[in-house]
Amino acid sequence: MIQVVNLEKTYPHPTKPVTALRGISLTIKKGSFSLLMGPSGCGKSTLLNLIGGLDHPTTGEIFIAGKPTRDFTDTEWTALRRSEIGMIFQFFNLLPMLNALENVSLPLLLRGDRSVEAREKARDALVGVGLESRLEHLPSALSGGEMQRVAIARADAICPKILLADEPTGNLDSKTGEDILRLLASRSQQSGVTILLATHSKQAISYGDQVIHLKDSQIDRIEEP
Ligand SMILES: Nc1ncnc2c1ncn2[C@@H]1O[C@H](COP(=O)(O)OP(=O)(O)O)[C@@H](O)[C@H]1O
Ligand SMILES: [Mg+2]
């Protein structure tokens, strides 16, 4: 489903460019649940952003469903992220003026879902992450863990084929984190969603089909627990 070949990413800087990824090659099978682990700064978010088309590799290739992504336009990437690639951001990226239901509905409306349907899907996704009592709250009235769950619901509501999740349980207590991991695992097992999830959580390991360990911008090892 996702193939990464010899990927390298260097962030330019006049005096101190940073190479965040070097020589990364990976295969992520359709419907699998892959974990991305490694110390802070090892390149996890960079890799997720490149696979989601939010930034471009310096060299190397990413194939999604067999297609090279190098020539995708920003418009094509945007359309993909509204329908096929769900992204859960490390820092949520919720819109502060929109309540939970509106935040989750927005990508659905932007891709052309009818407004009644969009609200329905958004509500279901929020109920799925345990936020039925927070539908009309603004992000500023939510705890970090609740904002994180809104961000998870927003990615889930589009029914993506690929889900890229950046430390989605980082702000959750272990019980809620476990519920979220179980929800995501059911998306891969029952709906065939391909999941790549960056995490520090040991709790997550038992859900992974493969664990990709990054270290110093490179793949240290890949385990199949
Ligand atoms: N936009 C950016 N500009 C410059 N350097 C960046 C940028 N984003 C990340 N980096 C650097 O790239 C490296 C990898 O960062 P990141 O992918 O965020 O790691 P992780 O998610 O594993 O903590 C770090 O050294 C970080 O400082
Ligand atoms: Mg990160």
Image (cartoon, rainbow, N blue to C red):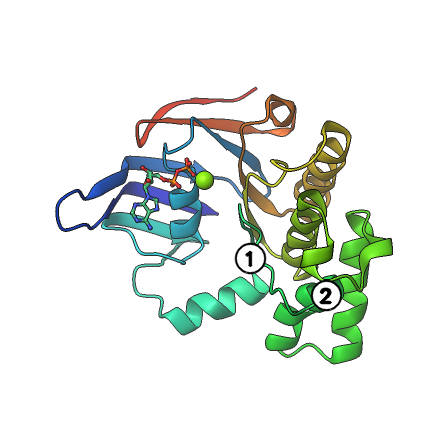
Structural distance between the alpha carbons of marks 1 and 2? 13 Å
Where residue 39 sits: x, y (%)?
Answer: 42, 26
Give the residue at the far right of this rendering.
Answer: 133
* 87 versus 28 height, above or below: below
Q: Which mark is residue 99?
A: 2
Around disc 2, counting alpha carbons within 10 Å, would you say few (fewer than 14), some (14 to 19), or many (20 or more)?
many
Is residue 116 among what the camera can see?
yes
Q: Amino acid at mark 2?
A: Asn
Position above or below: 193 against 137: above
Q: Nearer the viewer, residue 122 or 13?
A: 13
Residue at 75% across / 79% down in the picture? 115
Kindly identify the amino acid type of the residue bearing the numbered disc 1: Asn
Residue drawn 52% across the image and 28% down it:
210
Q: Quadrant of ligand 2?
A: top left
> Residue 204, how many percent across, how many down?
62, 28
**Residue lying furthest front:** 140
Pointer 1 or 2: first along the chain: 1
Q: Position of residue 145 (x, y in %)?
A: 69, 43
Image coords of residue 122 (percent x, y): 75, 63
Quarter of the picture containing the C terminus is top right
Q: Nearer the viewer, residue 70 or 41?
A: 41
Q: Secondary structure at mark 1?
A: loop
Q: Judge whether residue 111 can be spotted in this image.
A: no
**Viewer-proximal residue, 1 or 104?**
104
Asked which secondary structure carries label 2, the reply is loop
Residue at 68%, 69% (x, y): give it: 98
Position of residue 128 in the picture relative to residue 148 (left or right): right
Give the image quarter of residue 107: bottom right
Establish whether ligand 2 lies closer than 8 Å to the Cβ of label 1: no
Horizontal side, residue 21 vs residue 199: left or right: left
Q: Which residue is mark 1?
A: 93
